[in-house]
Image: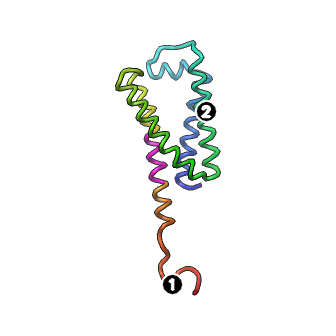
Amino acid sequence: MTTAARSVYVFGIYLLVLGGMLIGSPNTLLGLFGIPMTTEPWIQVLGITVMAIGMLDVACARTDQTGFFRATVWTRSFAFVAIVGFAISGIIPTVLAAFGAIDLAGALWTHVSLRSTTALHAVPATPGQGRPS
């Protein structure tokens, strides 16, 4: 598994756990962040979405889908900007910006991994190595 694949795989596992908590015990998770308990079904629906994205991440990591990895850098960066924007504007509690920070950290890990893999493959062979002429 490449480093980029591993970064997406780890993030996918995180999303599977987070989604499972949102589905199975949302008020436990909300309580950890000081958010009032809810009986609204939206939190479980969010959990389904989060788990589905986690499943995609894990599946694509296992098959080294580099194009997907590049797309996740953009989507996770967007999530960071949106969550922090909501926190700054008071739409969501600022403590939830931690989820945006996790998204950004994962995006940066994947981005750096993709760049190092690309740079590694772009290194030209030195004369005298490889197949004989």
Tell me the kind of residue under disc 1.
Gly
Going 41% across and 35% down the picture, which residue do you hit? Answer: 81
- Residue 106: which numbered mark, if any? none
x, y (%) of residue 90? Answer: 37, 21
Which stretch is magenta?
A: 104-113
- Residue 51: which numbered mark, if any? 2
Q: Is residue 96 above or below residue 118?
A: above
Q: Could you tell which of marks 1 and 2 lies nearer the N-terminus?
A: 2
Q: Secondary structure at mark 2?
A: helix
x, y (%) of residue 128? Answer: 51, 84
Q: Which quarter of the image is occupied by the N terminus? A: bottom right
Our reading of the magenta stretch's main secondary structure is helix
x, y (%) of residue 94? Answer: 38, 25
Q: Is residue 133 shown left or right of residue 127?
A: right
Q: Which quarter of the image is occupied by the C terminus? A: bottom right
Is residue 84 inside the magenta stretch?
Answer: no
Seen from the viewer's position, the closer of residues 91 and 96 is 91
Q: Is residue 126 above or below residue 8?
A: below
Q: Which residue is mark 1?
A: 128
